Image: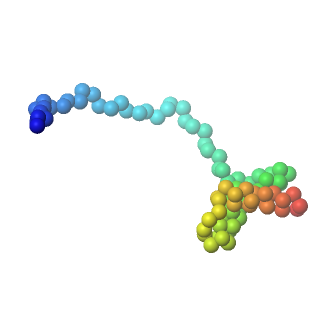
Amino acid sequence: MARKRVSEKEIVVSAPAPVRHKPATPRPPRRSVVAAVAPETATPVLEQIARLAYSYWEARGYQGGSPEEDWLRAEQELRAEASVA
């Protein structure tokens, strides 16, 4: 069986990796995702939807279901409550 040859030459890296620079122009400040919405739109706040969807998961004993379905159900329920009020 043939033996593999091991090179005795050193590997020399000629240049370091390029440095990434930050852009010269600053980014605009980010807006908070969880913000209150005007009452005339009757759109519930994301935090309220998240709490209600989580409570659905708790009620199932932390098992099964779909987070997306819980979210949509909570959103519909809160919109219905807001439109009645």
Choose top left, top right, bottom left or bottom right for residue 16: top left
In the shown orientation, is residue 24 left or right of residue 46? left
Q: Quadrant of the C terminus?
A: bottom right
Asked if 29 appears above or below 10 in the picture, the reply is below
Q: Where is residue 54 shown, x and y percent of the image?
A: 66, 65
Q: Where is residue 49 shown, x and y percent of the image?
A: 71, 59
Q: Where is residue 58 shown, x and y percent of the image?
A: 64, 70
Front one among 67 and 54: 67
At x 79% / y 53%, what residue is drawn? 43
Identify the colour scheme used: rainbow
User: Furthest residue to the front?
Assistant: 1
Q: Where is residue 42 shown, x and y percent of the image?
A: 83, 54
At x 55% / y 36%, what residue is drawn? 26
Choose top left, top right, bottom left or bottom right for residue 15: top left
At x 11% / y 34%, what residue is drawn? 2
Q: Quadrant of the N terminus?
A: top left
In the shown orientation, is residue 26 left or right of residue 55? left
Residue 51 visible in the shown view:
no
User: Furthest residue to the top?
Assistant: 14
At x 20% / y 30%, what residue is drawn? 12
Asked if 3 appears above or below 64 in the picture, the reply is above
In the shown orientation, is residue 43 left or right of residue 61? right
Choose top left, top right, bottom left or bottom right for residue 28: top right
Count of numbered circles on the image: 0
Residue 31 visible in the shown view:
yes
